[in-house]
Amino acid sequence: MQVINSNIMKNTESVRIRIFNTYGPGELYSNYRSVICLFTYRALNNMPYTVYLDHTRTSTYITDMANTIANISENFIPGEVYNIGGLDYHDIKTASDLILKYSGGNPDLIEYKESEDFTTKHKKVDCSKAIRDLNHNPKVDLEEGIKRTVNWMKDYYSKNSFENNLGKYL
């Protein structure tokens, strides 16, 4: 509302963005992080987690999102709203399977359920305006992004040297 009010009251050139399901190096574990962060941390630490089979997402690797945001100042159309998301539309099981592949996590610790109540089951993002106006061009696919994320988490949580390891995976 503040952005809209600024535009109306002061005629500012404003843009609004919606960022979807961004993950990757630098995302520290907590119960409120992306599903990829949660699963990766738990797989690396032999902790159980639940995979909801009837849920799909569009996931965005951190550098793809950051590159698009960097393009905004030179390319946006004032007043426009842009969705910034990845182009990989996948089910949650696919993400979990990739995490297990690269983390060596124990598949016996995973509980599979059909769906979770009170959450959006399918989140598919239309990024066509961001592609058109902001040169949004996601380059890191889900498998490569998860591989980089798993490797970063292994380094970070084993050595706890965030600054020394972050650049290797971006």
Image (cartoon, rainbow, N blue to C red):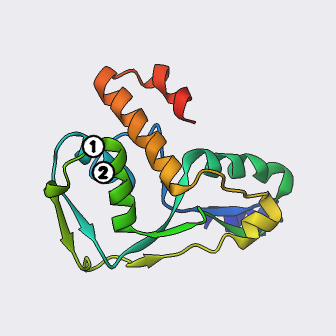
Residue wearing tag 1: 104
Q: Is residue 40 left or right of residue 89?
A: left
Residue 5 at x, y = what percent? 69, 67
Identify the amino acid type marked 1: Gly
Q: Secondary structure at mark 2?
A: helix
For the point 33% across and 66% down, which residue is it? Answer: 93
Q: Quadrant of residue 153?
A: top left
Quarter containing the C terminus:
top right
Residue 118 at x, y = what percent? 28, 79
In the image, is residue 45 above or below residue 21? Answer: above
Q: Pointers 2 and 1 in contact (CB under 8 A)?
A: yes
Q: Quadrant of residue 29?
A: top left
For the point 82% across and 64% down, which residue is it? Answer: 133
Quarter containing the N terminus:
bottom right
For the point 72% across and 57% down, which residue is it? Answer: 137
Q: Is residue 169 left or right of residue 41?
A: right
Residue 47 - label: none
Residue 117 at x, y = what percent? 25, 80
Q: Is residue 129 left or right of residue 143?
A: right
Whole-angstrom CA distance, mark 2 to mark 1, is 5 Å
- On the question of residue 23 being in view, the answer is no
